[in-house]
Image (spheres, rainbow, N blue to C red):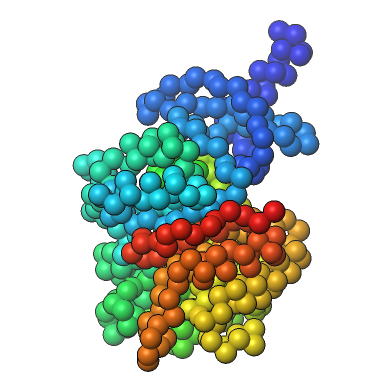
Amino acid sequence: MEKKQLRFVIFITVLLLGVVIPTTTHEAEETEVLTANDHSERMIQLTKRDIPNKIKRFYYDSGLTFEYPDAVRGIYLTGNSAGGARFESLLDFVDETELNSMVIDIKDDHGNLTFKLEEGHPYEDMAKNYIDDPREMLEVLEEKGIYPIARVVVFKDTNLAEKRPDLSFTENGQVWANSKGESFVSPFQTEVWEYNVEIAKMAAELGFQDIQFDYVRFPEGFERRDEMLEYDLGDYKDVDMNNIKKRVKAVTDFVAYAREELQYYGVDVSVDIFGYAATIEETPGIGQNFSKISSNVDVISSMIYPSHWTSYFGIDFPDEEPYRLVNEYAKVENEVLGELEESPLSRPWIQDFEAPWLYSGPTKQYDKEEVEAQIKALNENGIQEFLLWNSSNKYTENVDYTPLD
């Protein structure tokens, strides 16, 4: 065999053995498809992306095609909404506005998977039949050009905590729960990492284009409970750091692990994070360091709901001043991200709900004006993407979502 032919064969063999070159998923690409039917009838796709050395790599092809929007403008859907009668009305809502994306629960706040798994699957008992056929749902989104993002709630997981107390936090021999009855599993446990990333891989195989990890943290106020709760530090037991630094390292390490494990699927990895984390070096209890997490994701989604801030940025009552709150926050975030060697895309969560718990009298209503004020503040600071949060999935009508020029 001639040397040139031999070199080509070696190159292809190395690729088939799974060498992965990280790239972003937003760049233009030129694709050559190679059929390679395995036991799961998957396709392997050889992709040449616009990177300096023109290196080719294999990645998973779900068989669905979604174009990345000019800028993601999305809404949140629970599994019940995505799999129930409301799905059609929410489809129409997105279709008739400048919105273009949906964030859909794949693993929810209780730890439920939102679609049934085949009998005998190791995660079968964690699955609910909220979305009868997630693949069919994604095919509908593909047809309508709606960009799909899978939400995976990670460390808030009452189901797993109760099933596996050894992976959780206990007090007096019982799984600890917060005032809402919610339990967490420990970010120190790599078995928990693997479990959640396997679920993320299932979402990618279905055809989701972005895996959005939520509750990537310890329980709120953990610094006050640290000495009261019993838990296993796992691989972090002998790490020469104080407990605050250990928590930050565990959370950051999970994010880095997840991104590496998902490279083959060609999906974006995004993380939801408290907005206030951008304003301090690192959170003392929950383990979130804004810069470190941002350095390990494609998209950072700060939760910047005005209702969730106390007196901040010199604003006495942020819920009543949505434009000012978001404007001040965006300045801080831009500064922090600007200091990173490689910064992720910013795609904040904004408020489309009321916060009656803040008021003894009439509650500040979040209607067209308040939602548009938040979008305007983001746009004026160069942030074009956003996600609307309403836990009941009821969104304000007649909002102008058009980005500013």
Q: Number of marks in the image?
A: 0
Where residue 147 sits in the image (x, y, percent)? 49, 44
Q: Residue 111 versus residue 300: which sits nearer the camera?
A: 300
Could you say which quadrant of the image residue 14 lies in? top right
Where residue 268 sits in the image (x, y, percent)? 56, 48
Task: Please tell me whether residue 325 is drawn above or below residue 310 in the rendered image.
Answer: above
Where residue 55 sits in the image (x, y, percent)? 71, 32
Residue at x-position 57% and y-position 69%: 373
Residue sitting farthest toward the left:
119
Task: Please tell me whether residue 139 is drawn above or below residue 203 in the rendered image.
Answer: above
Does residue 221 appear to the left or right of 297 in the view shown? left
Task: Please tell me whether residue 317 is drawn above or below residue 128 in the rendered image.
Answer: below
Residue at x-position 57% and y-position 41%: 68
Residue at x-position 57% and y-position 44%: 69
Does residue 343 appear to the left or right of 170 in the view shown? right
Does residue 346 appear to the left or right of 181 in the view shown? right
Residue at x-position 65% and y-position 27%: 30
Residue 183 visible, this orientation: yes
Q: In which quadrant is the N terminus drawn? A: top right
Where residue 138 sits in the image (x, y, percent)? 39, 39
Residue 240 visible, this orientation: no
Q: Residue 128 versus residue 93: which sits nearer the camera?
A: 93
Residue sitting farthest toward the top:
1
